[in-house]
Each structure stands twice: as C-alpha cells, then as structure tokens.
Amino acid sequence: MHETAIVSSLFEVIQRQIAEHDIPRVIRVNLKIGDFAVVEPMTLRACFEVFAEGTVVEGAELVIQRVPIVGRCRRCGHQFEVKNHDFRCLGCANSSVEMLSGKELYIDSLDVEA
Ligand SMILES: [Zn+2]
C-alpha cells in the first residue's frame, strides 16, 4: 500500500529527530501534504498509529495540513490555484503550466515533550 511506504519514510525522519535531540515523547506530528500527492488521510492515520505503537510517538496527534496546487502559466505568467487537476491557465487557457506547489509531503515540525 502506497500510504505504508509514505508513513515508513516519515518515520525514518521522525526516528532520526528523536535520536538526535533525545526526545522523550512526541505529542504532535505536523505534516504538510500537497493536494497533488494522492494520499488518503484516513489510511495515513491508520498506518501512522501502527508505526507509532510501542515508540515515543505512540498516542501523538497527527495533524495534516493540505497544500493547494498552485500553477503558473508559462505563457502569460498568471498564477492560480489548480482545481480538479485542471492545469489550464485561467488567464489565457494555455496548458503549459508550471506547478509551484502541491507536491509537498513532509514533516513540517514535531511538537515534543521537553
Ligand atoms: Zn496564461
């Protein structure tokens, strides 16, 4: 499953942070996920709980912040939010659009117990 691989790599990052900073307990994990990254939040949460079990992350809240897809037209330079994966420019209908955001998938921050 796609989400398992994602959570697995997120946990590698978390474990590294825990080791580096000697973190006794993680209270909250703040994730940023771009709308272009097709991720099912429910599945992600379920996977997260499985991975967290028995670690200092167990019981931590998973906060998912969605990042909208923003495109910029290569012809007229218009910047707009891409809806329904329709990448045509809202200004000139050109379909050559550069994606400025929306592919994010990373841990923004960890809230920990000092
Ligand atoms: Zn345009």
Image (cartoon, grey):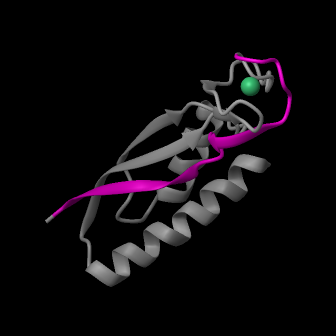
Q: Quadrant of ligand 1?
A: top right
Count of numbered marks? 0
Which quarter of the figure has residue 15? Answer: bottom left
The image shows residue 50 at horizontal and vertical percentages of 56, 52
The image shows residue 57 at horizontal and vertical percentages of 38, 59
Q: Which residues are magenta?
A: 91-113
The image shows residue 74 at horizontal and vertical percentages of 76, 38
Which quarter of the figure has residue 16? Answer: bottom left
**Magenta segment includes 16:** no
Task: From this view, report whether residue 90 is shown above or below residue 33.
Answer: above
- 21 left or right, relative to 91: left
The image shows residue 111 at horizontal and vertical percentages of 26, 54
Residue nearer the viewer, 80 or 84: 80
Q: Quadrant of the C terminus?
A: bottom left
Q: Residue at x 34, y 64 (%)?
A: 56
Q: Which residue ends up furthest to the right in the rendered image?
A: 95
Task: From this view, report whether residue 46 is shown above or below residue 93.
Answer: below
**Magenta segment includes 95:** yes
- 56 left or right, relative to 91: left
Q: Residue at x 63, y 32 (%)?
A: 69
Which quarter of the figure has residue 33? Answer: top right
By secondary structure, the bulk of the magenta-drawn segment is best described as strand
Q: Residue at x 77, y 34 (%)?
A: 75
Residue nearer the viewer, 110 or 50: 110
Q: Residue at x 54, y 71 (%)?
A: 12
Residue nearer the viewer, 84 or 48: 84
Q: Which residue ends up furthest to the left in the rendered image?
A: 114
Q: Which residue ends up furthest to the bottom in the rendered image?
A: 20
- 11 left or right, relative to 23: right
